[in-house]
Image (tube, rainbow, N blue to C red):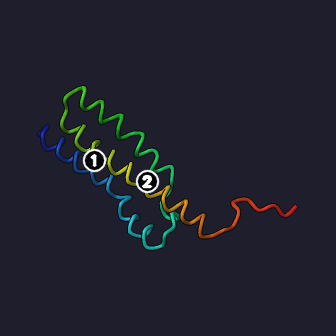
Amino acid sequence: MRILVEFLSCASLISMFASPLFIIKLVIQTKSVEFMPFYLSLSTFLMSPSFLVYGLLNEDLFIYVPNGIGTVFGILQLVLYFYYESKSREESGEPLIVSYA
């Protein structure tokens, strides 16, 4: 029974980390990060490596494998966010803050 729970939790963690990847297609097509929240990507990146290290220290395959995958996905999301965020700022040519005073 324990092994079943471990596999289910591992599968749910991997699906949780992979769910923002469906937005990546939209980000690439629109060349805009409007639909990909930065703080979600950042929190995924910050949480995954910490649990990856925890799983490695405890030699727990069911902790470090999904969090290792989450670390890779978190890095991918942040790289795409910064790439397309800078691209959209370059293309718009508008200042980020407009003062009408």
Left or right of 12 in this view: 101: right
How crowded pointer 1 is (Cα within 10 Å; few <14, some 14-19, many 20+) is rated as some
Q: Which mark is residue 81?
A: none
Amino acid carrying mark 1 in the image: Ile
Amino acid carrying mark 2 in the image: Val
Seen at 40% across and 64% down, the residue is 24
Left or right of 101 in this view: 15: left
Left or right of 23 in this view: 95: right
Indicate the secondary structure of the residue bearing disc 2: helix
- The image quadrant where one finds the C terminus is bottom right
Q: Nearer the viewer, mark 1 or mark 2?
A: 2
Residue topped by disc 2: 79
Left or right of 59 in this view: 16: right
How many marks overall? 2
Residue topped by disc 1: 69
Query: Residue 19 location in percent, x, y?
Result: 34, 58
Mark 1 and mark 2: Cα distance apart in space: 16 Å
Query: Residue 78 location in percent, x, y?
Result: 44, 52
Q: Earlier in the sequence, mark 1 or mark 2?
A: 1
Query: Residue 9 location in percent, x, y?
Result: 23, 45
Seen at 38% across and 49% down, the residue is 74
- The residue at the far top in this view is 57
Indicate the secondary structure of the residue bearing disc 1: helix
Task: Reply above or below: 41 against 64.
Answer: below
Task: Reply above or below: 90 against 49.
Answer: below
- The residue at the far right in this view is 101
Task: Reply above or below: 44 against 56.
Answer: below
